[in-house]
Amino acid sequence: MASTGLRKELECSICMSVYTDPVTLRCGHSFCRDCINNMRDTDGGSGVYLCPECRATFRKWPPLQRSISLCNVVENFLSTPSHQEQITWIRCTYCIHSPVLAVRSCLHCEASLCDNHLSIHSKGPEHVLTDPSTSLENRKCSVHKKILEYYCTEDAACICASCGLTGEHQGHQVEMLEEASEKKKKKLRNVLQKLITKRKKTEERVQSVEERRRKAQEKTSEEAERVTALFIDIRKRVDDLEKNVLCEISRWKEKVSLPLSDVIQKLEIKKNELYKKVRHIEELCNTTDPLTVLQELDTGDLCDPEEGGGDEDTGGHDGGDEDLDGHDGGDEDLEGHDGGGRAAELISHISLKLTDIMKDINVTFYILDPEDILLDVITADNNLLISDDLKTATWTEIRQNRPETLERFKHFQVMSSRRFTSGRHYWDVEISRSYWWRVGMCYPSIDRRGRQSFIGDNKKSWSLYGGLVYNNQYSVIHDREVIPLHQQISSDGVRICLDYEAGQLSFYELCDPIRHLHTFTTAFSEPLHAAICVYDGSIVISGRSRCEEPCP
């Protein structure tokens, strides 16, 4: 009855008909233009105008604004009769003087009947009554003009009695419409039950995803707070380090400046004395009186400093020079005061402090959910048991009876069914203290047979490996090039992170805090599959949902 409600909304409250050229007053109510103008003429004598709906008053007649949107709605409503209205409002065929609602339709008479006409209608078996309908001709055979009573199961068609006896459906398996309908309903009920179950699972999935989204939002908020606190601490520690170093430099400056100032003062005195001697000797060299020259030289004040060290009288004077030289220290002592060594010490101290600060910082933040990773049994070696949930691979001595195909690995390996061609993803693997294992990724074109088929032993795969045979130490390998990590395993968990566009495949140990082990960097040229290899042990790939966020 939606159209009835819409029609009610589109009726003018004055004429009780659908709007004609609707206009809107300032109070928001709409009316036909002619209707509201007639109301204005009626109220005009009082000098106050009222809205017929809310009785809002207007001292002056407001300008009438044509409601374009309402005009469009009315136009569409009038030009397109409602399907609901046609179905629900069917008139009695025999009530010709006034329209009366029909309650049943007769397929034989092809007429609709109200309660009164239904009470006097024929009760003969050929008069089949149905719910009111305007398409009664569709309930009859188009060939024989008889009521459709049967269902041809071979042609999946509704037929009349003549169609089954003499028509094109002669000899076919037929059923009564009610019987065929019940069978269809039974199938539909089964489908309905499956759909309801699927809908319920979908609703549960929606709730689960919403819960994960809520937790992810909480996690990101926590991580944002942690990052903020971390960098506040970093800035404080670096500021404190800067203040300490500047204070040390100031103290060092004073320590260096005072003794050097003393040396400079004594050197200035020595320099002035040497200036006097030089001037006096220049005067003697320019004098023409030999007596004066010889008498000045005999005083011993002008002897050569290099030659005067042996004379006791002059030695005391030169000793002052030696003492002075002791203060300036020649090149060696002055180098002791220029601060070169101390500067190197300070730089080294700053470097060590910054290194200590960075060691204390956990710069890895995880706010992602792990990827769905399922193992592909088609690729599993026959000495690997794959769990029902396709997440655990266990080595076994008993060979499995799987067909030998080109896709199947020959040596204790299995690939994921999912492949990655873009984006950032991660998942975790749990190694149950296996004797020997490898985890990583490979191209689908990897060899599945020879010794070179092990992940990491070729150019088409990358892996981290370890196990009891390696004293629980990690190594990474690609194209048979082994890089020992020299790190003792402290947990049974490994995280693998892939950034396809950046060409990075990273491995982390799932300890507290999580520890980065190694990152391969290359340009990936094919899709990538997760791959695991295990001997005498089990490996579990854990993953629940897709992630779109960057890997750490």
Image (cartoon, helix red, strand yellow):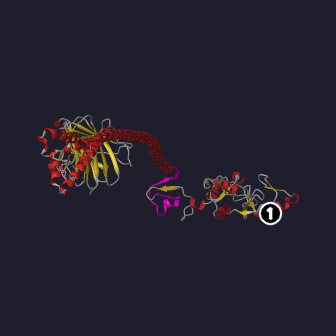
Is residue 516 visible to the viewer in this orientation of the structure?
no
Against 283, residue 68 (above or below) is below
In the image, is residue 114 part of the stretch drawn in magenta? no
Q: How many numbered circles are shown? A: 1
Query: Residue 1, position in %: x, y?
Result: 65, 53
Pick the residue in front: 376 or 548.
548
Query: Residue 488, position in %: x, y?
Result: 22, 36
Residue at 18 percent across and 57 percent down: it is 288
Query: Residue 382, position in %: x, y?
Result: 20, 44
Residue 278 placement, left or right of 111? left
Q: Amino acid at mark 1?
A: Asn
Is residue 153 visible to the viewer in this orientation of the structure?
yes
Q: Quadrant of the C terminus?
A: top left
* Displayed quadrant of residue 173: bottom left
Pick the residue in front: 183 or 439.
439
Question: Which residue bears the numbered disc 1?
Answer: 37
Pick the residue in front: 457 or 336.
336
Residue 364 placement, left or right of 334? right
Against 242, residue 279 (above or below) is below
Query: Residue 81, position in %: x, y?
Result: 64, 62
Element under label 1? helix
* Displayed quadrant of residue 15: bottom right
Disc 1 residue crowd, few under 14, some 14–19, many 20+, Cα 10 Å: some
In the image, is residue 165 part of the stretch drawn in magenta? yes
Tell me the magenta residue range: 156-178
